[in-house]
Image (cartoon, rainbow, N blue to C red):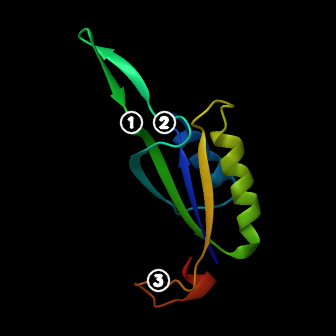
Amino acid sequence: MKKIEAIIKPFKIEEVKAALSEMGIEGMTVTEVKGFGRQKGHTEIYRGSEYTVDFLPKIKVEIVLADSAVEAAISAIVEAAKTGKIGDGKVFVLPVENAIRIRTNETGDQAV
């Protein structure tokens, strides 16, 4: 099993969710996060004063999948989240040792 963590622009979450749903992926965790990468934030003017916004709003999508579905899920996320502009985000893939469904005690791929 693998865990996919995708950091994307907030306005892209519905497209990513739809792309994953089309694949049959039903469960995901979505968190509102703040951060920056190469873009290093930006400056804004509010009531005549300029200030720097270091941490930009992003969405973190977390999914745990069987190894066989990982590549297709990554492709779906990348295609749905891509704008071609700086700050589109990143996708991370991490190994998952085990998963347990609390209600039924199912483990491994059956729990996901």
Q: Which residue is mark 1?
A: 54
Q: Is residue 13 left or right of residue 48?
A: right
Q: Label 3 is placed on what type of residue?
A: Arg
5 or 65, which lies in front?
5
Q: Residue at x 39, y 39 (%)?
A: 55
Classed neighbour count for the residue bearing mark 2: other residues with Cα under 10 Å, few (<14), some (14–19), many (≥20): some
Q: Residue furthest top?
A: 48
Disc 3, disc 1: CB below 8 Å? no
SS of the residue at dot 2?
A: loop
Q: Label 1 is placed on what type of residue?
A: Asp
Classed neighbour count for the residue bearing mark 1: other residues with Cα under 10 Å, few (<14), some (14–19), many (≥20): some
Q: Which residue is mark 3?
A: 101
Q: CA distance from mark 2 to mark 1?
A: 6 Å
Which is nearer the N-term, disc 3 or disc 2? 2
Q: CA distance from mark 3 to mark 1?
A: 39 Å
The correct choice, above or below, for 94 with respect to 36 in the image is below
Q: CA distance from mark 3 to mark 2?
A: 40 Å
Q: Which residue is mark 2?
A: 40
Q: Quadrant of residue 47?
A: top left
Which is nearer the N-term, disc 2 or disc 1? 2
SS of the residue at dot 3?
A: loop
Classed neighbour count for the residue bearing mark 3: other residues with Cα under 10 Å, few (<14), some (14–19), many (≥20): few
Disc 2, disc 1: CB below 8 Å? yes
Q: Is residue 2 left or right of residue 51?
A: right
Disc 3, disc 2: CB below 8 Å? no
> Could you tell me which quadrant the C terminus lies in?
bottom right
Q: Residue at x 35, y 27 (%)?
A: 52
Q: Residue at x 62, y 82 (%)?
A: 109
Q: Whole-percent x and y of residue 81?
A: 63, 41
SS of the residue at dot 1?
A: loop
Which is nearer the N-term, disc 3 or disc 1? 1
